[in-house]
Image: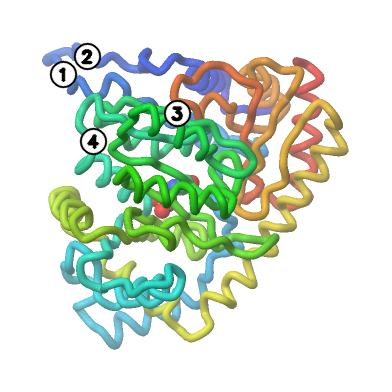
Amino acid sequence: MNAGGDGTLLAVLLLCTMPKRELPFPRSSIGAHMTYTFAKRTTGLRSSAIRDLLKVTEMSDMLSLAGGLPTPDSFPLADLRREADRLLGEYGPRVVQYSATDGVTELRQWIADEYTSILGRPIAVEGEIVVTHGSQQALDLLAKVLVDPGDVVVSESPAYLGAVQAIELFEPRFEVIPGDEHGMQVELLAERLEAGLRPKFVYVVPNFHNPSGATMSLERRKHLAALADRYGLLIVEDDPYGAIRFHGDPLPPVASFTNRVVYLSTFSKIVAPGFRVGWMIGPPEVMGWVARAKQAADLHTSTFAQLLLANVVGRDGWLDAQKARIVPIYRDRCDALSDALESTLGDQIRFHRPDGGMFLWSTFPNIADTTALLHHALQAGVAFVPGNAFTIDQAPDSKARFAYSTLSPNLLGEAAARLANAVAKC
Ligand SMILES: Cc1ncc(COP(=O)(O)O)c(C=O)c1O
């Protein structure tokens, strides 16, 4: 099985197993003519194990359960093409001109209308919304305006790796609260706050968490909101997957129970990620600083992408039809992978089936370090991300994240069979 050459395979294994502080490149590098010295804050900047793995899987006939890429079947190409043509014809040069830092009015109006209904309170087009270059930029901007070196940031564990990367650059001290199948254990956060912990913000992914697939219970959402009000906390509620629910009823966002929330979402999973358009809704004083930081970072998000998306999703009934088309694709893939893992691995694997999203979070009770399993899996032709990539300390563990979003149900069955071969070698 071609895994992109031994060198690449080794590099990936190395990146997945490397302690955080040993970088794959020197912080001060001496070239033929000059020396580059990098900022102290790069010391903790880890490489994304997932992006590194993606490089390998793109180069080979590997079956990848590693990257959580939306399925290309979900992209509404015909609608996008028709609308792009109309925009260029009817709006003319405005669609490719510079535009406002906090976002074009048409898109902010759509966001305000949607969330006035979802959050149950009026959301202002001016002051409470900033359109971002994907939710990833929202995380970067928030860390930039909120975190000084040594400040405490509370995160769930496991955690979305991209958030850890974005926040880590500003040299915080992470306070980790474990999650279970009902999301962050808010009771433990309450105990630490009681004991005097005062974080700059609390980062949560309440719907179909990446990587754990967990959904935070209604009781914990209310409890978290109550803690925010009691202790004057800021909650960062990151919700890229909420629309991809295939079982049960939607739960209200934490932001519907308190104003002390910056809520993030994105078109990446429900329309297409390549536009890089997301949004944040939050208290005007926070959004004001975020908008200034965004001016400095990129002036504004692509005018064309924003207008295109606002006009596509703004059509009556379009978003409901898009969800009705794509959610069953993810449901069937989740079922296919879950069924295949259960039948090929039996009691050698444990997981909770998620109610939505793109990820299955698994424990291998007989394998202490899943980076060893990854080594055999890559040789068997299947890739996944070891659990320790999603922790702050990166200590070896027996967890793994499997993304079922990209492969067809048949290929997911084949991937599970290859994984079973790899488990047998561990
Ligand atoms: C939890 C979470 N937050 C944020 C993002 C970033 O999304 P975007 O494509 O909008 O930058 C992702 C992407 O996978 C994610 O899983």
Q: CA distance from mark 4 to mark 2?
A: 28 Å
Lower sequence index among marks 3 and 2: 2
**Disc 4 target residue:** 147
Q: Tell whether 172 sits left or right of 114.
A: left
Q: Which one is in front, 366 or 203?
A: 203
Query: Could you tell me the amino acid type at mark 2?
Result: Ser
Give the mark nearer the N terminus: 2 vs 1: 2
Could you tell which of marks 4 and 2 lies nearer the N-terminus? Answer: 2
Residue 258 has which mark? none
Dot 3: element: strand
Q: Is residue 210 above or below residue 309?
A: above
Other-residue count near label 4 (Cα within 10 Å), few / some / many at <14 / 14–19 / ≥20:
many
Q: Nearer the viewer, mark 1 or mark 4?
A: 4
Residue matched to label 1:
36
Q: CA distance from mark 3 to mark 4?
A: 16 Å
Labels 2 & 1 near each other (Cβ < 8 A) = yes
- Give the mark, 3 or 1, whose residue is nearer the N terminus: 1
Q: Amino acid at mark 3?
A: Val
Which dot marks residue 29? 2
Question: Would residue 415 be found to the left or right of residue 378 on screen?
Answer: right
Asked which secondary structure carries label 2, the reply is strand
Whole-percent x and y of residue 131?
A: 29, 62
Dot in front, 4 or 2: 4
Q: Amino acid at mark 1?
A: Tyr
Residue at 71 percent across and 17 percent down: it is: 367
Q: Which mark is residue 176?
A: 3
Of helix, strand and loop, which one carries label 1?
strand
Q: Quadrant of residue 97?
A: bottom left
Q: Residue at x 74, y 57 (%)?
A: 332
Upstream in sequence: badge 1 or badge 4 = 1
